[in-house]
Image: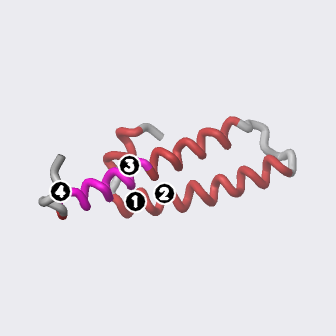
Amino acid sequence: MKMYEIKEMSTEEIKKRILEEEINLTDLRFQHELKNLTNTAKLKLVKKDIARLKTILKQRQSAAAAPAEPGKEK
């Protein structure tokens, strides 16, 4: 998943996608342990996607909190 795709998503869609990807990662880990996973690179890709989703979500949360504190300027 690309960053521009994530930025186009709403916050609720991102939260939902994080949960889906974490479930997917758990399933992939089980498959890997049982030697049923043929493409182990999927583990790395899913972890990176989760990190990207969480990064955008954190940026949105900090951007929403920043205007609430007008007295604190750099």
Percent of width and height locating residue 54: 45, 52
Q: Which residues are magenta?
A: 55-67
Percent of width and height locating residue 21: 57, 54
Quadrant in which residue 44 is drawn: top right
User: Which element is circle 1 on?
Assistant: helix
Q: Nearer the viewer, residue 67 or 17?
A: 67
The amino acid marked with disc number 1 is: Glu
Q: Residue furthest left?
A: 70
Contact (Cβ within 8 Å) of mark 2 with mark 4 = no
Compute the Cα span from label 1 to label 2: 6 Å
Q: Earlier in the sequence, mark 1 or mark 4?
A: 1
20 with respect to 53 (left or right): right
Indicate which label's residue lies in the foreground, 2 or 4. 4
Q: Look at the picture and state if 49 lies above or below 41.
A: below
Q: Nearer the viewer, residue 50 or 69?
A: 69
Judging by the rendered image, the residue that carries numbered circle 4 is 72
Compute the Cα span from label 2 to label 3: 12 Å
Judging by the rendered image, the residue that carries numbered circle 1 is 13
- Label 2 neighbourhood size at 10 Å, few (<14), some (14-19), many (20+)? some
Indicate which label's residue lies in the foreground, 2 or 3. 3
- Label 3 neighbourhood size at 10 Å, few (<14), some (14-19), many (20+)? some
Judging by the rendered image, the residue that carries numbered circle 2 is 17
